[in-house]
Amino acid sequence: MAPAVHHRTATVDGLEVFYREAGDPKTPAVVLLHGFPTSSHMFRRLIPALADRYHVIAPDHIGFGQSAMPAPRDFPYTFDALTDVTSGLLQHLGVDRFAMYVQDYGAPIGWRLALRDPDRITAIITQNGNAYEEGFVKPFWDGLFAYAEAPGPQTEAAVRGALTPESIRWQYVNGVADPSLVSPDNWVHDLALLDRPGNDEIQLRLFRDYATNVDLYPKVHRYFRESRVPLLAVWGANDEIFGPAGAEAFRRDLPDAEIHLIDTGHFALETHLDPIADHIRAFLTRTLP
């Protein structure tokens, strides 16, 4: 029987945070941090695959999924602010130490958690969760960085293109050998949430803040070198957002990093759940007490 997955909410700094939770709280914690434009929905099949051994927690970031979506005037949509809420949720749940799985936006949130308190992080799994400039694939990022540097009508059109149905579907099927393996429920679900009134401005705020993540990279690299944190990269090798060079780069600062390049795209769990879960289980068995 698969472990039961609970769908819960907690109040953090006055905001309702939705999270999926499974497994025994007495076992080692594994925190799953999702990316753009999705939510903890991306982990719906991975959670039960890990929860027989681990306490698995997958929150929706503020402005995403089922979590609160305050207007930008009421919440500073920055990666620092999203990290504050994630940290508050873990404190609320009594999770002191944890391994983390980071993907896309989940990576800069995870890196900030590690920099704030390195001793809390027991291990890292990164699935197309970038920490090196080599990982950025042109031309996807050119428009975003131009907008972050000089927000305005001339640069905004390119980044608004990332919110269209065509672009969201592309993120799921690009680089996938057999797109029929990817359920369209994914982009239909994401688009329904992105299309909520006011959510476009939330996403634009985060696009404008993205350059702060790159500025943080030297500190992240120092953290890797000093902590020697165990790291597993399970990476969609055909991703044209965060390319495989971003996975290989982890060995520069973590020579013992375990890296697997998988023949798929950005949302690798959609097509390669079983091999990724196997890699994670073997990695955590070796690295966690």
Image (cartoon, rainbow, N blue to C red):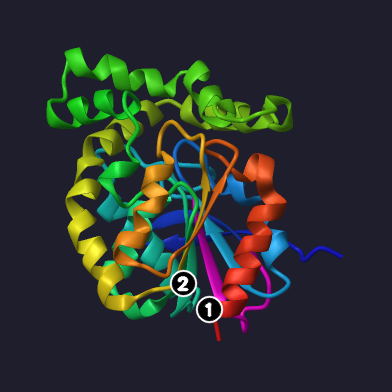
Extreme residue in the left direction: 150
Residue under pointer 1: 287
Q: Earlier in the sequence, mark 2 or mark 1?
A: 2
Asked if residue 236 is positioned above or below residue 116 in the image, the reply reads above
Q: Residues within 10 Å of mark 2 (few under 14, many from 20)?
A: many
Residue 18 placement (x, y as % from top left): 53, 54
Residue occupying the point 62% across, 84% down: 26
Query: Which residue is outermost to the right?
Result: 1
Residue at 60% across, 64% down: 280
Labels 2 & 1 near each other (Cβ < 8 A): yes
- Cα separation, mark 2 vs mark 1, equals 7 Å
Position of residue 197 measured from the top left corner of the image (x, y, whole percent): 42, 25
- 49 shown above or below 243: below
> Per the image, is 244 magenta?
no
Secondary structure type for disc 1: helix
Looking at numbered disc 1 in the image, what kind of residue is underneath it?
Answer: Thr
The answer to whether residue 118 shows anywhere in this view is yes
Of 109 and 252, which appears nearest the observer?
A: 252
Task: Judge whether 73 appears above or below 256 on screen.
Answer: above
Q: Is residue 24 on the magenta stretch?
A: yes
Q: Amino acid at mark 2?
A: Ala
Q: Which residues are magenta?
A: 21-34
| Position of the C terminus by quadrant | bottom right
- The residue that mark 2 highlights is 123
Observer able to see residue 6: no
Residue 214: x %, y % from top left: 22, 47
SS class, disc 2: strand
